[in-house]
Amino acid sequence: MSTNRKNDLLRQGSILAVAGILVRLIGILYRIPMSNLLGDAGNGIYSVAYGIYGVTLTLASSSLPLAVSKLIAQRSIQKQHRNAYRLFRIALAFSLAIGAAAALFLFFGADFLEGLYARQGLAKPLRIVAPTVLVMSALGILRGFFQGKSTMLPTAVSQLLEQLVNALVSIAAISWMMKAFVESDQQSAYGAAGGIMGTLAGALTALLFLIFIFFVCRPHLYRQIRHDVHGSTETVPDILKALMVTVIPVILSQTVYQIGFTLDDLIFGNLMDVRGIDNNTISSLQGVFNSQYNILINAPVAVATAMASSTIPSIAASTAAGNQSEIRRKVRGVIKFNMAVAIPAAVGLAVLARPILILLFPSLTQYRDLAANLLVYGSSAVVFFALSTITSAVLQSVNQMRLPVIHGAISLILHVLILYFLLKYTDLGIYALIIGNVSFPIVICALNWRSVGTALSYKQEVQKTFLIPLISSAIMGLAARGVYGLLFSWTEKNTLSVAIAVLTAVLVYGFCLLRFYCFTRQELYDLPFGGRIVRLAQRMRLLP
């Protein structure tokens, strides 16, 4: 591969990685005012509806963009532009047909799903989100087309537009719905429906943008087709077969993660209903778990995974080149970086649980003590989700596509059995979801860890990957908690105390990592703003 080609791939990958980080950050930030507006019961209904939508979308079309981008890229490199365009059209028609069927199922099956999940009011947001599946079917194929043509900018811009419009419309629609139906006993359901409106509006905006870009690029596409390398024209069955072979492993892998969350909602709602817990309380408890707990747990996982994801394509390139030492070096670096982000995040959420909840969710007071306890007991999930996600991506990068699917399925079965037993035969209630939430990624981590070692003849270095970040995080946690306690006792200002405690945590943790030589000089250069970190560490004499 030429140097220019490598640089272009790196540049395109960086565009998508940066967009991914921004999209995740926007997604995390807008959920905070959404949660405050919806209240605990509204959050419960919204999260269950969104979970069902996520599973439906995964089964219907969300894996097709990856398949389309890969197959179009193969044909474009061979200059078979006519076949690439034919594949795009067939994939679009196929995706729209599946998306339409899924949308009809959600719309007309909303009442059935409301009864199945024992969640009063669930049908309203499900009917509103149903058309989104169809919109996302077209949107995903267009994104896959542009990525297959080695241009990531349209996808990146469309993702940012989608998330921004989603955030603005969701907040505005929830606010309007909650006021318009303030006298209704279904206020929470209408509010959840307002939140789902943002999902549809964001997807439509992104689709219209990509349609515009496609028509702008169409003259260039026709020029490519005119200069096509003549070869056999692929038939519809051949194209559909190629799509299925590429799509099925991805569908299975993604479905395991998605279905786990919605199964939690299904099992928890029904077993609590059998126990005689009223519907509003069940929705409120699920709202606490899915909003206040999950939003904060997923934030560091999303950022760590997005920042590390730019390394995964390079691992795949090294695998294609057969460079085993380079693969092991990259795997070691990406896992170490993720742990350096995830471990302190878990400790920080545990030691500052209540102050953070007061800061971010000031209007949600009824279950604040419960939410704080969930964060304290369940914050370790950050570490295990980050590690399971990265090791799954590593296995896929080294052509072990089936293993993450198998490991996820095993973990899901164990997770369902554990959760059912705890909810059925103990009084743990919502705490059973925490145990399940932590045990699910632990099993995947253990299985992935063994497979990565076997596939690569590889063993992760433990001291600098796990022990030093853990010790540094413990010191950081003590410092942050102490600073918060002192400041709050003097000022009684939670926002100021949290801000200074978090700043203290960042500085103390960074100092400890450098002081204990967690990263080599080269590894520091590979980090974001690595050059500045190295220069600062040199001035402080913290580098050997």
Image (tube, rainbow, N blue to C red):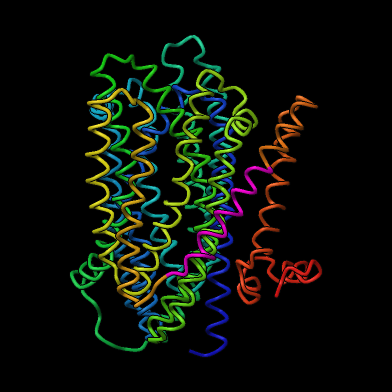
> Where's the C terminus, which quadrant?
bottom right
Of 364 and 510, nearer the camera is: 510
Find out whether residue 472 is within the magenta segment: yes
Of 284 and 329, nearer the camera is: 329
Question: What's the magenta bit mostly, secondary-structure-wise?
Answer: helix
Left or right position of 146 against 364: left
- Measured as percent of width and height from the top left, residue 249 is found at 26, 62
Q: Which residues are magenta?
A: 460-479
Q: Residue at x 35, y 77 (%)?
A: 456
Left or right position of 263 against 522: left
Q: Residue 189 falls in which quadrant of the image?
A: top left
Q: Residue at x 57, y 27 (%)?
A: 36
Of 334 and 279, nearer the camera is: 334
- Measured as percent of width and height from the top left, residue 532 is found at 75, 68
- Measured as percent of width and height from the top left, residue 2 is found at 52, 90
Find out whether residue 385 is within the magenta segment: no
Q: Residue 133 falls in which quadrant of the image?
A: top left
Compared with residue 32, is residue 324 higher up or lower down, i.e. above or below?
below
- Measured as percent of width and height from the top left, residue 113 is found at 26, 30
Number of on-image labels: 0
Left or right position of 4 against 115: right
Compared with residue 473, is residue 521 higher up or lower down, i.e. above or below?
below
Question: What residue occupies the far top of the structure in this picture?
Answer: 183
Of 247 and 451, nearer the camera is: 451
Q: Residue at x 30, y 56 (%)?
A: 95
